[in-house]
Amino acid sequence: MSASGDLQKMIFHVLKPGYNDEYKDFVRLSPNRAKAFPECPRCHCRIGPWEWLRPFRVKTTKSRCFGDLFTDKMVLTVSQGFREAAVAAQLKGLSFWDDHLEVYRSGSALFSQAPTYHVVHRNYSFTRIDPSGSGLVVQELVGCEHCNVMTRARVERLVIDELTWNGDDIFWPTGLYGACVVTSRFVEVVAQGSFANFTFIHQDEYVEDWQQGFFGSRSELNGK
């Protein structure tokens, strides 16, 4: 891919990790999953979680579902409205399973008032972070130079190595296992549609400090 001026101006954001209360109400009822983890084609190191397979069924104890993003952090599901907006905006790297989410109340009753949610299919790429620009402190390199899977001690900010970025608007970069990264185009679609329950951390604000067990925004870390 070319290092065009547009790519150099791209701003990235991290979709805020979901350990807040609103994310704890997403309990998967159907345990079906792929037989193996996604892995690096070179060293066979694990590069992501097991993929959830249909049927897509979750339980909620609340009287409502959560806006246009409903997730337990590992699985992302989005509303019909957001899906339509994302498709119209031609966001790259975002694809969906055909089956929609079945939401149940406590017990076994189907939650008939739940909006229609679609399960996002993870597309794995080998986009890398810039270790120097990100202030990355590596605890241990687990994978190879291709996948760059590692345990991290600290990250000072998010800087993507754009020469390795394929243009996707949503991706899980190697070297930053567990973090879902989106482009400013993705954020704009959310803002323009006033879609609820999406929280983003600007690339300059993203911090990880595993000595303190923290990953999130710099302002949150400073306020601890």
Image (cartoon, grey):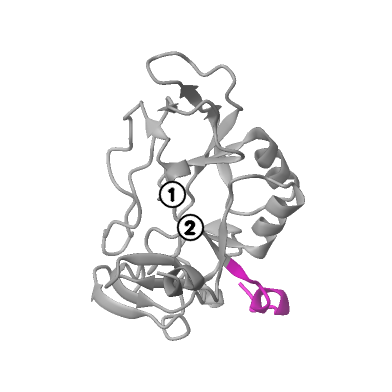
The answer to which quarter of the image holds residue 72 is top left
Q: Position of residue 16 (x, y in %)?
A: 50, 57
The answer to which quarter of the image holds residue 151 is bottom left
Residue located 40% across and 69% down the image: 224
Label 1 belongs to which residue?
20
**Kind of residue at disc 1:** Asn
> Dot 1 lies on which element?
loop
Vertical placement of residue 54 versus 123, above or below: above
Give the left or right position of residue 129, taking residue 194 as reference: left
Q: Residues within 10 Å of mark 2 (few under 14, many from 20)?
A: some
The residue range painted magenta reads 1-12
Residue located 34% across and 57% down the image: 47
Q: Nearer the viewer, mark 2 or mark 1?
A: 1
Q: Position of residue 195 (x, y in %)?
A: 67, 45
Q: Position of residue 24 (x, y in %)?
A: 40, 40
Q: Earlier in the sequence, mark 2 or mark 1?
A: 1
Kindly give the residue lying farthest to the top in the view shown.
109
Label 2 belongs to which residue?
180
Give the left or right position of residue 71, taking residue 144 as reference: right
